Image (cartoon, helix red, strand yellow):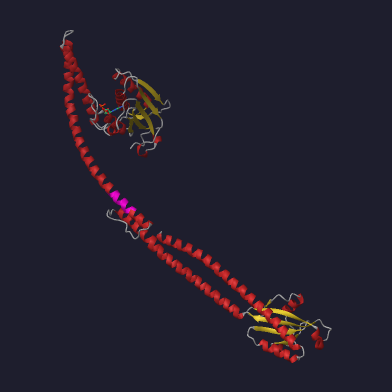
Amino acid sequence: MLRSINVKINAAIAIALVIVLGLSAYFTLSTQNVQAEENTQSKARLLTQSVTNIIKMDMVGQYEKDLTKIILTLGQFKEIETLRIFSPDGLILHSAIPQEVGANIDELVMNVFLSGDMNKPFRSGAEEHRSMCRVEVMYNAPECHRCHGSDTEIIGVLEVCLSMAATDEQIERNARFMVISTVLTILMIVIVISLLTTLIVKRPISSLMSTIEKRRRGEVDARVRLYSNDELGKLGQSFNDMLSRLDEANRQMQRLHAEQMSRAERLASIGEMAASVAHEIKNPLAGLSGATQVLSSSFPEGDPRSEVVKEMLKLTVRLDKTINDLLSFAKVATPTFEQVNPNDIIEDALFFAIGETSDKDVKTVRRLDQMMPEIPLDSHQMQQVFLNLFINARHASKPGQALTIISRITPEGPLPDGIPVNDYVEIAVVDEGDGIPPDRLKEIFKPFFTTKVQGTGLGLPISRNIVEAHGGIMGVESTVGEGATFYVWLKKRQDTAS
Ligand code: ADP
């Protein structure tokens, strides 16, 4: 993968360079070519005009053999490929190559002459290399009449062809040089970038990846090797910091887990002991309660001792409740599921709660969703949960305040730990009491935590045990002075129960 990053970067750069350098080489060579052609053209023009003038000057008062000599002499210049004078009907009269005198000029030159467009240079197609040609018409001027008479308008046509072989060779050399230098430049840049990406990118990323791999294999000491202080270096540093924090969190979690385990074990054995002690107390207590009842009925009306016995009876009832709570907390609640509508259980629990706390004038408001479906519940256990919550709420309320019970098919807010809301129904028990201070919120689900003189501190822990045995969740939120809301979220289906 890293190699492919390298390859991708280099391929992209190489393509960009080929396009940019290739285009610039192409345009440079084209410009050189055009310039070379233009140079040769102006040379051809200059030469034809000079030769025409020389011939004219020489012809006036000279002999024809001097013209041949001039042409032969000029024709010796290496660059001059063709230098000839031909008659208007195409017969070669004078030439730097004496053998072709008397022959006809080729069709191309004749056509240029006949077209009349003689100022325009043209290319001869005859040779392997390019050559630039030009024709210049020599008109029969009055000073020529002495030898040529006055009948003809044109006395001859001068044709000059300049070879572009040397220029072409130079252009070819330039092109070769450009191709080689372009290829070398691209190679150099690609090599340098490849080296840089290896040093700056590949090395730190490899180190990061190998550290991740080592950690995966369980090497807890593995850390990223830092090569630089740039972004990747900082990434490595942050990764190392994160690993250290993770290790520390892990150590803390292990310590906490060990502590909790030993605490749980301790609690479990205390719980077992408490349960067996409670069992032992339960039977004698039943006997004691029965005996006290018999005793109370044996006193005559108005006897002051009957008040004492009544108080004794109350205390045995409270003792019995405490023992029952302790036993149901110690017992692992395994619910027996049946399809029940939670609204029905709420109604039953409310009936008992109002009975238990009838001394208080608390309004009960029901906002129960009439579309609430039947869900798998243990009615008896869930009745105990709601009863606990309603009694607590009524205990916390002052006369005239309201206790609102809400049931919703889908929870209103998000559930803890991102649990999907659609799998649960929600029951909220809202009171307008004094509320619970934040530091106490953490304590209220702990066994035996109570702020009530006659409380056991087992109501909420028992309720939470039952709800969790149903695969449900319990939650609480409270604002001091405004009241508390206890939530019970229950699963709509038990097949997904954990
Ligand atoms: P108990 O009712 O026997 O005290 P619980 O476990 O039911 O035991 O409750 C523990 C404590 O939580 C209570 O003593 C009380 O301080 C607090 N608590 C419970 N429900 C409420 C409520 N609705 N408003 C304020 N405090 C509450």
Report x, y in % for residue 245.
Answer: 29, 49
Left or right, 47 with reference to 210: right
Q: Which residues are magenta?
A: 238-247
Q: Is residue 334 visible?
A: no
Residue 239 falls inside the magenta stretch: yes
* Residue nearer the viewer, 413 or 145: 145
Write the residue at 61% across / 73% down. 33
Q: Quadrant of residue 227?
A: bottom left
Most prominent secondary structure in the magenta stretch?
A: helix
Image-quarter location of ligand 1:
top left
Left or right, 215 with reference to 128: left
Q: Quadrant of the C terminus?
A: top left
* Residue nearer the viewer, 157 or 496: 157
Left or right, 16 with reference to 419: right
User: Is residue 423 placed above or below 179 in the rendered structure?
Assistant: above
Q: Is residue 114 visible?
A: yes
Report x, y in % for residue 50.
Answer: 70, 83
Left or right, 153 with reference to 340: right
User: Is residue 57 placed above or below 330 in the rendered structure?
Assistant: below
User: Is residue 477 placed above or below 289 in the rendered structure?
Assistant: below
User: Is residue 271 placed above or below 291 in the rendered structure?
Assistant: below
* Residue nearer the viewer, 333 or 487: 487
Q: Quadrant of the N terminus?
A: bottom left
Q: Quadrant of residue 404?
A: top left
Report x, y in % for residue 347.
Answer: 36, 22
Q: Residue furthest top?
A: 301
Residue 298 falls inside the magenta stretch: no
Q: Quadrant of residue 450?
A: top left
**How many numbered marks are there?**
0
